[in-house]
Image (tube, rainbow, N blue to C red):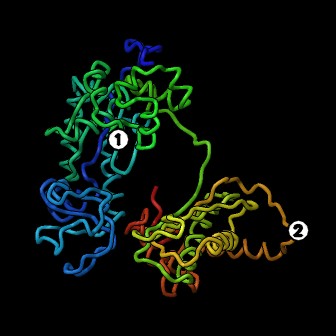
Amino acid sequence: MFERQLTFDYDKEPRRDILCIDCKSFYASCEAVSRGLDPLKVKLVVMSYPSDNKKERGSGLILASSPSAKKAYGISNVSRARDLPFPYPDDLVIAAPRMNLYMKVQREINQIYRNFVDDSNIAVYSVDETFLDVTDSLRYFKCRTAFELARKIQTIVFKETGIYTTIGIGDNPLLAKLALDNEAKHNKDMKAEWRYEDVQEKLWRIPEMTDFWGIGTQTQKRLNKLRIYSIKDLAHYNYYTLKKEMGIMGSQLYAHAWGIDRSFLGETHTPKSKSIGNSQVLNKDYYDRDEIKIVIREMADQVATRLRKENKKTACISLWIGYSLHYVDDEGKRGFHKQVSLDPTHSSKKISETLLKIFNMYYHGQVIRNIGVNCSKLEAPTHQQINLFEDIKQLDKEDTFDGVVDTIRSKYGFTKLVYASSLLEGARAIARSSLVGGHAGGMSGIEGKEQPHEK
């Protein structure tokens, strides 16, 4: 069963000098630098909904923590306010999220990277991670090795922004990422290099399978059922059996277990499908049906605006409701997720009506803390399918109304034109109009003059 039937010749594989660069504890570091503090020494957490009074605990999520805070309090970026010692220690800094600040610093750092590579050799992986292909840059910057250039990049980023960076180096993006996650983050110089020659000694010895790029808990369970308990086991499993059991994912995992990744940063990828959605963690537990419906209407308005902005219509709408932390319904569930199909639309009214119909069918007094809305099966509005039971003049009025609302908000800002319900108790749209990605800083999709939309 463990006889290897497919081999790779590293001499025939592409060898590049790839850097995977991570901004260490990025959000927390941005907050520390803005306060003139050392990101590695200060005990700082970025927390949603912190209390203005330090004698009150607050109720938010810990979105980011400095290395010293993680070490001192045993917390991670999935912890909550209750996981911190209380009363709060005097040397603990609690910061509310400022996404506009983080995005500004991210742009500054990525602009520094662009001094070393052209646009075809850079790939922004996430808000705090970026891949660079520096193969053709070494000679220009008079560096003999990628390791030397990585050190130069670290120095410049720190001097110009105060942010520490951790860098993984490899022959391909996979090895660079694995070097970053499994070694560089633990080294004092915050760098590590994994090449094809290191696969057996380093890659196969990754202690936890979930520390491997592309293997989550569910994939690990599937592999365990095949008696694969380590990356070394994966590399020596029968390739054809693995492909039969797991399809293309099995083929990819097998190749990755040998350190093989034939992707290039300059390649473009067009997703097979796309969706537009919005989700939020509410600032408190919601018990009142009418207040929950107000929030759903606001979210419907936002996704509908984004659909029109991207010139798309949706033929499938879904609603996700998550209950309060310790709440479990009569069926033992912690929430529900339902979707319905409909005639393609980008009407705020239709999307709102559809979501509320789902909500009314499945809501029976549960305590709500999370709400998510998603529109899929998108298509361009090349033609309009008329329903015999709908008034064409009324449809035209609704389209005109939506267009006017979009124009005013785009020119003068979201808060200059809101529905009356957004002024009622429980409404969240105005408060969230200064958010970016759900955190303090901008309103995705319906920004206007007040929060300029930046590329």
Q: Which residue is painted at 21% across and 43% down in the image?
A: 156
Front residue of 234 and 278? 234
Q: Which label was assigned to residue 388? A: 2
Q: Which label was assigned to residue 114? A: 1
> Based on the displayed image, in which of its 4 quarters is residue 119 positioned?
top left
Relative vertical location of residue 164 with respect to residue 306 in this rendering, above or below: above
| Residue 129 horizontal/vertical position (percent) | 34, 45
Q: Which residue is painted at 29% across and 61% down in the image?
A: 79
Q: Mark 2 falls on what kind of element?
A: loop
Q: Quadrant of the N terminus?
A: top left
Q: Which residue is painted at 65% across and 72% down in the image?
A: 361
How crowded is the residue under tag 1: few (<14 C-alpha within 10 Å), some, or many (20+)? some
| Residue 415 horizontal/vertical position (percent) | 50, 79
Whether residue 403 is visible to the viewer of this picture, yes or no, is no
Relative vertical location of residue 64 with respect to residue 117 in this rendering, above or below: below
Relative vertical location of residue 206 with respect to residue 15 in this rendering, above or below: below
Q: Which label was assigned to residue 452? A: none
Q: How far apart are the alpha carbons under marks 1 and 2? A: 56 Å
Q: Give the residue type at disc 2.
A: Leu
Q: Mark 1 falls on what kind of element?
A: loop
